[in-house]
Amino acid sequence: MQFNIAKLAVAAGAMALAAASMATPTHYLPTDKWFEGIKVPQGIYWDAAKALAVRKGGYLACPATAGENTFCANLISDISFYSDVSIHGDRIGPWLGGYHGPDGVWHWMNNAPFTYAKWWPGQPDGYGGATQVIMYYNGAGFGENWGDHPGTAINGFGPPRGFVIEYDRAPASAYVELQNYLPTPEGVEIVVDFIDNGNVVATSTATLEADGSFIITPPTNGTFMVRFKASHWLSKTIGPVTVGTSVLENVNLSLINGDVDGDDSVTIFDYLVLSDYFDKSDSDADWNTVGANGMRPVDADLDGDGTITVFDYLILSTNFDKSGS
C-alpha cells in the first residue's frame, strides 16, 4: 500500500480541519501516549484523515494493546462518529492507523508490533478492493471492534464522521497574530525552538490555519523557553513552560512585522532590501527568486498584498530598531 499523501488528500484534510470538532487530547498512562477523538460532521476518508492527523502533530491512532483500544474506542463511543447506515445495514466507524501492507500482513503506521487485534466477526474481509485500512466497525452499532475498508468511497457506503489521533507526547496549541498582514495567515510556516540554558535543543515547524492557530507535538519532554518565529516577523519567546507531559493549550502570540532579511531585527538592512525590490509585484517572473542581496522580492512584501509599496515602508518605519524577544 502506498503511503504518499496526494495533494488532493492534503487539501481535503485542510478543509476538514476547519469543520472538525476536536477535544482535548487525553493521556493513556499505561503506555504514556495521548489520544484525541476527532469528529468531522461531513465525513472523511482515510487519506484525508491521515493528513489531518499529521497536520495536528500526531498520526492516526495505532491501538496496539487491548487497553489502548478500549481507551480509543471510548473517545468516539457515539453513533455520530459513524457513517449513515449502508445498503447492507451496517455502519463504517472512525479510522485508525492500521493498513494491510504489500507483504500481505497488517501493520501499524507508527511501526508498533501488530500483535493485538479486535476484529468484528467475519472481518477482515477485503471488501471493496485490494488496498485495506482499519476502521472501527461494529455492525450497525458502535464499540471496540474493527473492520477493514479500502479507505476511499465505495458504492453503498457513506464515509465515517471521525477518526482517532495518537500523539507520542502531549501536544501544544497556539494562536498567532501576524501583525500588519492583509491575507489570512493560512499556510504561513512558523518555526518553534525549544531552548534550554540558552541552547536550542529541539525545533519543530508548523503551518498556520486561517485563524492563526497551530498544533505541534513537542519533539522532547521538559521545561524550556520556547521561541516562535515566522519569516519576516520578529520572534517571540515565552516561558519557561513545561511541554510534552501535559497539554499546553491556547498560547496567544502577536508577532511584529518588518524583519525582511530574517536576522530577527528591523534595521537599515531591511530598508535596503525593500528598496532593491520597490514596486515589484507577484506578477514579476523573479518574485520568488533570490537576488544579489540574498533575499527574494516576496520577502519584502510585508503586508502580503502582492506588491512592494510605500505601505511596506510604513511597516518598517513603525517597527524600526525593534528586535525579537
Image: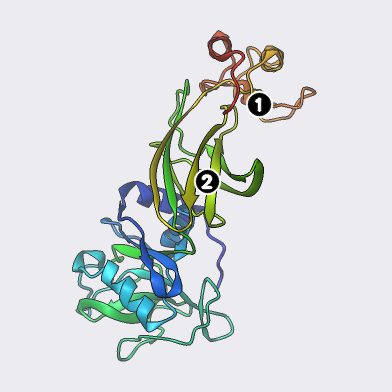
Please report contact status of discs 2 and 1: CB closer than 8 Å, yes or no.
no
Residue most extreme to the bottom: 122
- Horizontal placement of 81 versus 234: left or right? left
- Horizontal placement of 137 versus 10: left or right? left
Residue position for label 1: 287
For the point 30% across and 91% down, the residue is 121
Which structural element holds mark 1?
loop
Q: Position of residue 269 (x, y in %)?
A: 71, 16
Residue most extreme to the front: 197
Seen in the picture, residue 53 relative to 33 is either above or below; the reply is above
Compute the Cα span from label 2 to label 1.
24 Å
Q: Position of residue 159 (x, y in %)?
A: 31, 65
Q: Position of residue 1 (x, y in %)?
A: 55, 74
- Horizontal placement of 144 versus 219: left or right? left
Question: The C terminus is located in which quarter?
Answer: top right
Which structural element holds mark 2?
strand
Answer with the quarter of the image where residue 195 lies: top right
For the point 41% across and 56% down, the residue is 246
Amino acid type, mark 2: Ala
In this view of the protein, which residue sits in the foreground, 31 or 35? 31
Residue position for label 2: 206
N-terminal label among 2 and 1: 2
In this view of the protein, which residue sits in the foreground, 95 or 58? 58
Q: Residues within 10 Å of mark 1 (few under 14, many from 20)?
A: some
Q: Position of residue 268 (x, y in %)?
A: 69, 12
Q: Nearer the viewer, mark 2 or mark 1?
A: 2
Amino acid type, mark 1: Trp
